[in-house]
Image (spheres, rainbow, N blue to C red):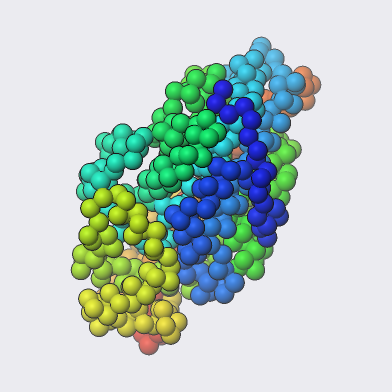
Amino acid sequence: MILPNYEFFGWTIQDPIHGGITFGPIEKAIIDHPLFQRLHGLRQNSLLYLVFPSANHTRFDHSLGVMSLSGKLFEHIIRNQDKILEAGNSRKTYQDPFRLDDPLIKQSIQQLRSDHYFKVALLASALFHDIGHGPLSHLFDRFFPSVEEVLRWTDIPGYKHIHARLSLETKSTTSISHEIMSCIVAAKVLSDIDPTLRHHGISTERMILDICAIIDDRIPPSDYFQATTYKTHSLLHEIISSDLDADRMDYLLRDSRMCGVNYGLYDPDRILKSMCTYALSDTGELHLAVRNSGLGALEDLLLSRYQMHGQIYCHKTNRACNAMLEKIRGRLVSAKWSWYDGCHSLDALLATFAGFNDHKFVDLLQQETADHGAGKVKEIAHKLFTERKLFKRAYEDRGSTNAPSPSTAKEAETRWRDFQGRLQAKGIRFTEDVFPNKGPKLHKPNYYLKVLKKHPSLGHYMVHELKDVSSVAHYLPELEITYRVYCKEPYVKEAKALLL
């Protein structure tokens, strides 16, 4: 046992969504680090504040919320599992390949309960899950260094072999993802707080490996994690990243509150009270499940996510801002612009990264477009960041892959491309925009989120596929795509005339 005793309630931060968020000394050391403090300067939703002015909340706020919910999910799963185990099941009537009353599950739950290392690793992973994001959200991802460059620079003990493993699955010239950047930043922060970790008897290299494994499930965890009776790594990863994770549980409530809309609402307490786990007998992995009593709240969450993506994140004006950003990004890419020129080590890269926030990056974009941009790109940057004179929507269509819809995604794409052809024939300049709204992939063989229902006469719990017990989840599209065309305001009327 690594951490039999740990004080989780040493400090409190007041939050408008979750109330008092408490944390211990290791979490505090992470929060106080400059690479985490930089999240104060990153808006959670990039330029959404240009549409909903109060949406100025940051990735710092969100990360604290994810930490809080992760801890609550962890505790409720352990508490609720005792009830599942007490109810038991009948082996004769119980469908394989799932397990609920296996005594070894009880042993695994007891390991999670008694050794606080697992919960500390989960809370740290929650804090780190978004720490690799750059300014203006995913726009910055296109400017990250390549896999090969990072591998050459990486000198953090405990991380180099992790990155080497990831590099085998990615082209060496491909830019790293923000998830990999999160692992890199996490490794750096943990190395810097090594004295705090050692004070609590925790190996920094083990902690780096386990946190990277929770964030990115392609990475195997430490031997200590794998020594649990059933594999708990899969369960902790799903608390951070799944269709029922702390990430979306927080951002739906937070974005809804800060935008002043009612789309993202659901009952988090009802979900927490029904959370539990089950085991796959063939892999020995624990996975997330929800008892039937929380199915309605889970359906509300899935529907809220669908509505928030369709009505808020895909809002025509928000996507106009993104379309203008893409124009600016394209010019910088063609000019081979780089924010890390002169960086020849990981320390130098992260020191530069720590200094970037939304405001500084916008200032830099305006300067770079003034220095290297063509006249039209300079004009776009000025209209976006200074005047707020945005592109206007000239065309919109929508299609989905599997749910009832006026048209399939392929049919919608065909109409969209046909309209672009008519614009080109008339010499009208335009910008295209595609927004995917991804729903639960219920029919995938590795869709692990299940629902536990009590057998009406025998009294034990049985595992059910979500698609078999939820009509709401069943009818949500696995993928819905919105196709748009934007033009500068003087050309919108002429463009729309081509629709007649």
Q: Is residue 337 left or right of residue 100?
A: left
Residue drawn at 75 percent across, 21 percent down: 87
Q: Position of residue 73 (x, y in %)?
A: 64, 39
Residue drawn at 36 percent across, 61 percent down: 140
Q: In this view, does 50 lie to the left or right of 452?
A: left
Q: In this view, does 344 lie above or below 470?
A: below
Q: Can residue 233 be seen in this view?
A: yes
Which quarter of the image is occupied by the C terminus?
bottom left
Determine which quarter of the picture holds residue 184: top left
Q: Which of 389 and 82 is in front in this view?
A: 82
Q: Is residue 156 above or below residue 177?
A: above
Q: Is residue 165 left or right of residue 453?
A: left
Q: Position of residue 43 (x, y in %)?
A: 50, 64
The image shows a total of numbered marks equal to 0
Determine which quarter of the picture holds residue 270: top right
Residue drawn at 53 percent across, 72 percent down: 49
Q: Which of 433 and 240 is in front in this view?
A: 240
Q: Which residue lies furthest to the right in this view?
A: 457
Q: Is residue 19 above or below residue 325?
A: above
Q: Which of 168 and 468 is in front in this view?
A: 168
Q: Which of 497 and 444 is in front in this view?
A: 444
Q: Position of residue 4 (x, y in %)?
A: 62, 27
Q: Residue furthest bottom?
A: 490
Residue drawn at 20 percent across, 68 percent down: 335
Which quarter of the image is occupied by the N terminus?
top right
Q: Can residue 439 be seen in this view?
A: no
Determine which quarter of the picture holds residue 108: top right
